[in-house]
Image: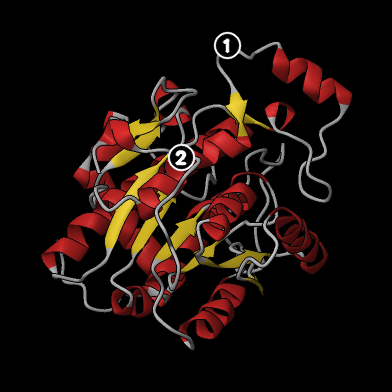
Amino acid sequence: MAEAEWNPESLPDLSGKRFLITGANAGLGFFSSLQLARAGGHVVMTGRNPNRLADARAALLRQAPGASVETLLLDTSNLGSVRAAAASARGKTGIAGLLLNAGIVAPPRQRQVTRDGFELVFATNVLGHYALAGELLTSLAAGRGRMVWVGSVSTSLTPYDPIDPELLNGYSPWRAYVQSKVATTALGFEAARRLSAARVPVDSIVAHPGYSTSGRTRRVTGVNEPTRWARFSDNLQAAVTQSKERGAWPLVRALVDPDAASGEYWGPSRVFRGEPRRAKAARITRDREIAERLWNYCEHATGTEWPYLTAS
């Protein structure tokens, strides 16, 4: 399917395919789940809060009656939760798509650590997803599936090198977020290289949602209920923003378009907004030395070695 022919509002038939989405109870994760379910896919919505997850599932079914959807508790900041969820997900048929979406977008003002002892933002946005992808690799291979890592345009604005992943020195909310997205993107590309070298039938693609805001997104009870102020302030930026629903388009296209290839980067056509297209990632995220360093760090920090892989 040619790039220009893609219709994000009319996806290919996904019947018989299983997708697991992290952070599916709101925002990009919810709308990605909805788009996949409407196209016939079986969607496993994951999140850390059981009540919010139940509300999100109910909201999805109100908009897509009869959709095939289930929920699974998963907190990417907790490695025990990651392994428990992966064990449950592995016990079923192969996985066609894994969307590594969950994350902290508004980090705390002061540095915090998880129960595993890692800096909260890096643990949630990076370590948990690295471990989850590794734990589910056999299921992805069985389904000849695809993993999609969620990047950010912020990596081009302030390209922090994650030399200190735990931010023991110089913590700031912005630095914590941006360097987590540099790491996420670099790991997505490194995974593509390693999977290809090991001839594992799994694609690894990175996609970013542009500048997608809640205030530009339609109201969905229990999922997206922005205040009047959020509506007003986000609409002031209408020229460079879009809804979370449209922000999910590049993620979903990277996940299901048969012409999307491992190692590619996808995003909105006008960088911050627009229909999904191939894009060029920030230079720092394409640095193989940085990627290998991050891979080794994540492997040792999480105690997770991906099956099948050889050194790149």
Drawn side of residue 278 relative to residue 12, left or right: left
Query: Which quadrant does the N terminus fall into?
Result: top left
Residue 68, given in percent of the width and then of the height, sits at 60, 70
Determine crowd level at label 1: few under 14, some 14-19, many 20+ residues with C-alpha closer than 10 A.
few
Q: Residue at x 57, y 11 (%)?
A: 239
Drawn side of residue 72 relative to residue 123, left or right: right
Asked which secondary structure carries label 2, the reply is: loop
Query: Which quadrant does the C terminus fall into?
Result: bottom left
Residue 108: assigned label? none
Question: Which residue has dot 2 on it?
Answer: 8
Is residue 301 shown to the viewer in this render? no
Q: Describe the colour scheme in one phrase.
A: secondary structure
Determine crowd level at label 2: few under 14, some 14-19, many 20+ residues with C-alpha closer than 10 A.
some
As shown in the figure, which amino acid type bears the numbered disc 2?
Answer: Pro
Mark closest to the chain's N terminus, 2 or 1: 2
Q: Residue at x 44, y 49 (%)?
A: 11
Q: Is residue 76 above or below residue 151?
A: below
Residue 123, given in percent of the width and then of the height, sits at 55, 57
Q: Foreground mark, 2 or 1?
A: 2
Depth check: give the residue in front, 120 or 90: 90
Question: Which residue has dot 1 on it?
Answer: 239
Q: Is residue 6 above or below residue 32?
A: above
Depth check: give the residue in front, 311 or 147: 147
